[in-house]
Image: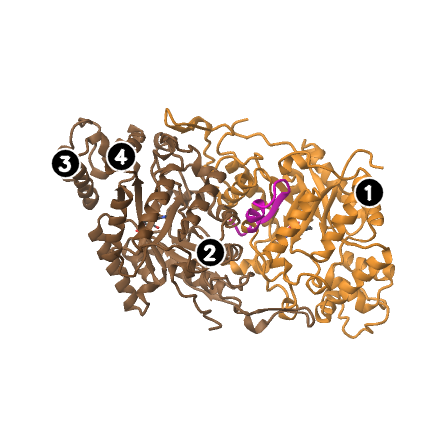
Chain colours: A brown, B orange
Amino acid sequence: MSKGRTLKLGAFMRPISIHTGAWRFPGAVPDANFNLEELIRSIKKLEAAKFDAFFMADHLAVLNMPIEALRRSHTVTSFEPFTLLSALAMVTERIGLIATASTTFDEPFHIARRFASLDHISQGRAGWNIVTTSNPDAALNFGRDDHMDHGERYRRAREFYDVVTGLWDSFADDAFIRDAASGLYFDPDRLHRLDHRGEFLSVRGPLHIARPVQGWPVIVQAGASEPGRQLAAETAELVFCAPGTIAGARSYYADVKGRMEKIGRDPEHMKILPGAFVVTADSVEEAREKHLLLDSLVHEESAIASLSIALGTDVSGFDLDGPLPEIPDSNASKSGRAQTIALARREGLTVRQLARRLGGYAGLSFVGTAKTIADEMEEWLETRASDGFNVMFPWLPGGLDAFVDKVVPELRRRGLFRREYEGRTLRENLGLPRPANRFFP
Amino acid sequence: MSKGRTLKLGAFMRPISIHTGAWRFPGAVPDANFNLEELIRSIKKLEAAKFDAFFMADHLAVLNMPIEALRRSHTVTSFEPFTLLSALAMVTERIGLIATASTTFDEPFHIARRFASLDHISQGRAGWNIVTTSNPDAALNFGRDDHMDHGERYRRAREFYDVVTGLWDSFADDAFIRDAASGLYFDPDRLHRLDHRGEFLSVRGPLHIARPVQGWPVIVQAGASEPGRQLAAETAELVFCAPGTIAGARSYYADVKGRMEKIGRDPEHMKILPGAFVVTADSVEEAREKHLLLDSLVHEESAIASLSIALGTDVSGFDLDGPLPEIPDSNASKSGRAQTIALARREGLTVRQLARRLGGYAGLSFVGTAKTIADEMEEWLETRASDGFNVMFPWLPGGLDAFVDKVVPELRRRGLFRREYEGRTLRENLGLPRPANRFFP
Ligand SMILES: Cc1cc2nc3c(=O)[nH]c(=O)nc-3n(C[C@H](O)[C@H](O)[C@H](O)COP(=O)(O)O)c2cc1C
Ligand SMILES: Cc1cc2nc3c(=O)[nH]c(=O)nc-3n(C[C@H](O)[C@H](O)[C@H](O)COP(=O)(O)O)c2cc1C
């Protein structure tokens, strides 16, 4: 039984599945990632299940993989996050709407304005996933030959956050009087001009939209590096992470929440949600079979390339239907290689199966029944490996429906997940405080 | 009776009224400009009346007026165009959705993507009003001290248009195969990488969204200068303009359509719609009274400042309740001054009334009954002063409702306006061809 804390659940929905075989699964809607009706059906189902948020990752280039892999990808055509989330705001009432936006390839004035507008349109359900954009190909779509270096990207991100939140605070919450008799629309003493001049940005302000309903949309972060963790500790209220193991997750959790305490933030004011790929069925055996079937839909070309990269060794000469042979040391990422080898041994996968897993999704996965999945989620929650999950569905609609129809009721039976939304805004549902206006406290 | 051509009608809806007194009018919804429910009611009413499009102007700074005027402005808090239009797309089915976006302060990759997304979400109803942003204060919100000069802005705009349309053409219309059996999501031979390198922009591409439903969203332009007219002739399919007189409008019309013919474009492939401020009532007298009442709601501070600017003379010492005295010559815009003086003489306005007109809206206005307004619109259409109008309403909801309920039926009785939408997309309703893909003709 729960000791009182309950899970927060986000739905990772752009792409609709992180798994490259998703669109080929028997019964899947092949164009679900770009099908407005299917996305509406999904978000309504997620809202009925009381999910905290619908999360859209975002990328600003697609040619970072060879065309042989790209032509098999269902994510190559996607809606732009703000236009999609605003549309989805009109068919939902409570679920949060989280958009990813880059601090490297956009302007703080545009970003502040767009999130404020989405927050007003959705009546307080917007969240901003701050990314610095790791894909170096994005630079080529924005007039730059080289990607800004990692440290510089994070320094700009920090300043960008200060400017955006400062712009959101342009008007006091009570600035708008709209007194038709006197003709005063707003009280000019309740308007602040930012006049920011910093290392990367200079922005006068004010923003020409009222302060967001939530004060600030919920701040989300997904950086894993040292500066990424520090940015999260200083700014984030929701963190999406991709831990390899539960032990790794616990140490990440302790590290980031410890950093928060060091700078005087209440650790309860951040919810850490690892991405979790979930395959649900009525027996563990059936779930595993579905998972293997899904992996088998990853094309061999993409699969072999992914495994070679993960191991730092060309595997194309290996016996694909035999077990993984001993792998010599290399200069490639040691932790990635060790994890991949451990995965093969643990599940007894052939080289071909392992390659397909890597070409599909090799991160944290819960594959089993409502009971086994709830057991794992409960362990993560109770051992402070996480505050919930950003659930990744294997395909639409079946993979999402199975989780919602089977796992959610089991979590609820255990008292681990809400029966009703606690509040009206994303912030209220996540148990986060509404930030004071820094200029009109 | 109409000789066959019919009017195209846009609704100028950001701000919901160009008139600064709009929000104070008796019976007006004071926050209509920032009230989602009121905007939804309005767009549904406009769609039921078969308007071609809902048009959002856009500005990237608000401090270009003194705070004494700003604090009386109902436009100081507004939704961002894409988030609003996407939301409105969900409550409508046929009306066009035109957003203004700046070529000076945004990136072509973002703009192309956002319009493509809006066009898919609305099933072919998006339009892009290309502006170079005339407000120099905008630069201060985007890290620049000075505004780019006028000629340079227009050269960048032309290149920007080429890049955006090139990005829209990234995928052939039939690129997406989604063959689950073979695993091919799209045909790589039907994907084009732009690889643009020009004077202002370098963008690799491709865009990661399918070609818009309309091929390209409808291209709209509102520039008035020499380079503005040329850009319109080369690119625009819809033009919003602000002529002072019907004679001026005819010569603008002939000029821009003549430029089109010179470069081999069919002049029918552009619709020219002047902005027209419309006050409708059951008698001309009543309409004039409403207009004067509306003007009287402009605060005197804003009014006097506006008139002084228009005349190039400080008018604060004038007898406000007397007629306009003789005005000495000055260096200020001569055509603006002459127009303002002519307006005072024509309508017999006092200095105060004239000042309030200037502080409200002094451009093309039709003030009268359904019959007199239809007469004027018919004359404009038939003498090729325009192909229709971008209608500016004096306040919401009454000013919009009066036009829709009274003028639209009168136009229809005369055969001057549609009874049903001709097609499903904005392009089809405007009678514009769908552009071929330049890379996959
Ligand atoms: C669950 C999750 C979601 C992410 N979503 C995005 C995204 O949408 N766009 C993006 O550019 N990066 C995304 N990232 C990458 C992170 O922003 C970050 O670049 C990555 O975790 C590496 O961390 P670092 O940049 O601190 O080295 C995501 C990462 C995780 C773990
Ligand atoms: C009806 C109409 C609507 C306009 N809307 C906008 C707008 O939304 N944003 C903007 O920056 N400029 C807008 N403009 C200004 C034009 O883009 C242009 O700057 C102006 O007409 C002056 O022309 P020029 O730039 O060619 O000198 C509009 C102009 C007209 C006539």
Q: Does residue A264 appear to the left or right of B132 in the view shown?
A: left
The residue depicted at 44 percent of the width and 60 percent of the height is: A423
Q: Earlier in the sequence, mark 4 or mark 2?
A: 2
Residue that badge 4 annotates: A286
Using the image, determine if residue B303 lies above or below residue B209. below
Which of the numbered marks, if any, corresponds to residue A19?
A: none
Which of the numbered marks, if any, corresponds to residue A125?
A: 2
- Residue B283: image quadrant is bottom right
Indicate the amino acid at tag 2: Arg
Using the image, determine if residue A155 lies above or below residue B261. below
- Closer to us: mark 1 or mark 4? 4
Residue that badge 3 annotates: A327
Label 1 element class = helix
Instruction: State which chain disc 3 sits on.
Output: A
Q: Are marks 2 and 3 on the same chain?
A: yes
- C-alpha separation, residue under disc 2 versus residue under disc 3: 48 Å
* Label 4–label 2 contact, CB within 8 A: no
Residue that badge 1 annotates: B378
Instruction: State which chain disc 2 sits on.
Output: A
The residue depicted at 23 percent of the width and 32 percent of the height is: A353
Please provide the residue range marked out in magenta.
B84-106
Q: In which quadrant of the rendered image does the N terminus of chain B lie? A: top right
